[in-house]
Image (spheres, rainbow, N blue to C red):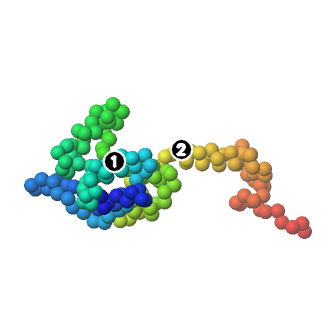
Amino acid sequence: MQDIDLTNWIWTVRRQTTPSPGGLADKNTKGKTARRVPLIQEVRPMVAQRVLAAGGRPDARLFTGPRGGRITTAVLRDATHWDDVVNSLGYEHLRRHDLRHTGLTRMADAGVPLHVLRLIAGHGSPQTTQRYLHPDLRPVIHAGHNLSTHLTTKPGLPTPAEPRANTPGLVGNPQPGPAQ
């Protein structure tokens, strides 16, 4: 399992399996560049178990189909009961690729910088990565509440109901100067 670094818990994604004439074929990733994906604590026991099951073969697959070969889209859908799960959750329009968006968004919400997310996703530009992000609005709402609290409790600043004229320090209002 040369693609799994069990010391740093990083998966180096180097290949993808796609349908081709005559069956499935392995090829480079879409961006033709290997990318490193962190393996979070919650999946490490399963990954370690799969690495052991591979028997130390460096080119072995972490996950295989029911007959030991490549996993097709249909096999993955059936093995995960995808249609049943998303329907029972009320997300019948959810696609597996949407989970990539969710993973990148969760990392962004956790504070992972955009340039790191871009590397993990294997995107060529930050703009592509930004299109994948659907940030949680709770921090934005919280920022509005914080600003309102700040404006209404800070001594010397007007409350939203107070007039702004003659308030020193605000844009457009004169600062008190030295007595003349």
Residue for point 30% across, 45% down = 96
Give the residue drawn at x 49%, y 46%: 136
- Identify the image quadrant of the C terminus: bottom right
> Does any portion of residue 97 appear in the rendered image?
no
Across and down, in percent, residue 27 comes to 21, 61
Q: Which residue is mark 2?
A: 138
Q: Going from the N terminus, do you reach mark 2 or mark 1 first?
A: 1
- The answer to whether 90 appears left or right of 153 in the picture is left
Q: Secondary structure at mark 2?
A: helix
Query: Measured from the top left, where is residue 31 in percent x and y?
Result: 29, 64
Please tell me whether residue 102 is drawn above or below residue 90 in the rendered image: below
Q: Nearer the viewer, residue 162 or 136?
A: 136
Q: Please name the residue that numbered disc 1 is placed on.
A: 49
**Residue positioned 25% across, 39% down in the render:** 79
Amino acid residing under circle 1: Gln
Task: Give the left or right position of residue 172, taking residue 131 as reference.
Answer: right
